[in-house]
Image: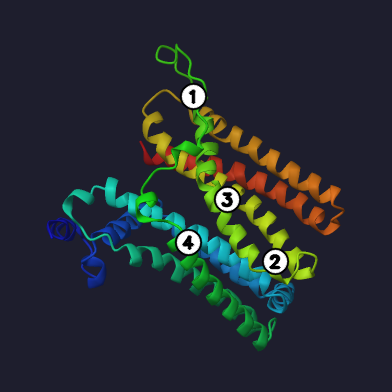
Amino acid sequence: MAGNDVVMSLSPLPGLPSWIRVRPYLLASVLSWLNIHRRYRFLLPVSLAVLLAAAGLLTLPIVGHILEAAAQYPITPFASLGAACAIFTARRKAHIRRSQVDSWLAPLGAPGSVLLRASFPLLLQVAVLVLAVAIPLATGGLSWAGAKALWLTIVSAYLLGALVGWFSQRDAAAARPAFHYVAVRKPRENWAQAPRLEPLSYWAVGRAQVISKPKVAAKIASFVFLALPMGANSRIGQQAIAIAAAGMVLLYVVALFIGTVTVAFDAARWLTPTTIRFGQFVRVLGYRVILAQLWVWSWVVFLSYAAALPGALRIGLPLALWVLVLTCIVTVVTSWMAMRRSR
């Protein structure tokens, strides 16, 4: 009860709903997002511009044809969305459990609101996906039967994925850090006298290995197993196996993005007051991430070529180039924001 009084007394927002005010963790999250908005005023107009651009792309006829094809083969979006939801739910639950131990609210006895904090992002994602299907339906690019099939696929995939992700993390294991998945580099005896910035480059890759650890990859495989009884030699079985391979690659690439962003903000807090320059910080933080992506995408292109999959090769090569360019942009922008925030 003391935690509620402390947080509510610090709240400068009388217009917040009462169900947020009585949950200090939710209230702290709202205040954190508001502080980010006040510090970076350009984020809101940029986000609105991106959403409007995405809505405009959804009105294109080719998007309606792609969604219509996805509605005819629902196993593909079902396996992809279900695996992504299971991974997100498991990681979200682990993050919430850890916050109950190391958060500044933990000693105050504040209610954790675990289920509400874990389910709110999922409901928001489902609403965005439902709206993304509704836009082509309204513009005539998608049929009503295809929209209903996609809506049913989205809801069922998120329900099953949320259950798999929720029950795959035991409460005791959820709060345990997964540092044992990060390789420990050989220390140097003179680091205390002559420290180097190079170890920072391993942290983003190490964070990606924590996110894409074997237990996480197993959640992707669990949804693929749902399609394997249909026959591995059948078209649906082959699609399921291809989804698993693509999902693991995309999982590692997204994990590298998340690792780069989180490490940039964590490291900038300590390095901004020093003489480390912005260019040096960006170079050390990003070059090993780019090397890891080059290694992954090289294997994707090589295997696509060896398996005689021209369609995958035509998609994989431009996608790899775009992801590398996006990685450079994300590294520079997040490093600038992190160092600016820490000043």
Per the image, the residue denoted by label 4 is 165
Left or right for 179, reference 223: left
* Three-letter amino acid code of the residue under disc 3: Val
Looking at the image, the residue that sits furthest to the bottom is 144
Residue 199 coordinates in the image, percent (x, y): 50, 26
The residue at the point 41 percent across, 51 percent down is 40
Per the image, the residue denoted by label 1 is 197
Q: Is residue 53 visible?
A: no
Q: Earlier in the sequence, mark 4 or mark 3?
A: 4
Nearest to the eye among marks 4 and 1: give it. Answer: 4
Q: Is residue 338 above or below residue 79?
A: above
Nearest to the eye among marks 3 and 1: give it. Answer: 3
Closest to the observer: 215 or 109?
215
Tag count in the figure?
4
The residue at the point 45 percent across, 43 percent down is 262
Alpha-carbon span between mark 1 and mark 2: 47 Å
Q: Residues within 10 Å of mark 2 (few under 14, many from 20)?
A: some
Q: Earlier in the sequence, mark 3 or mark 1?
A: 1
Closest to the observer: 176 or 277?
176
Left or right for 310, reference 34: right
Cβ atoms under marks 3 and 1 closer than 8 Å: no
Residue 267 coordinates in the image, percent (x, y): 42, 34
Nearest to the eye among marks 4 and 3: give it. Answer: 4
The residue at the point 39 percent across, 57 percent down is 93
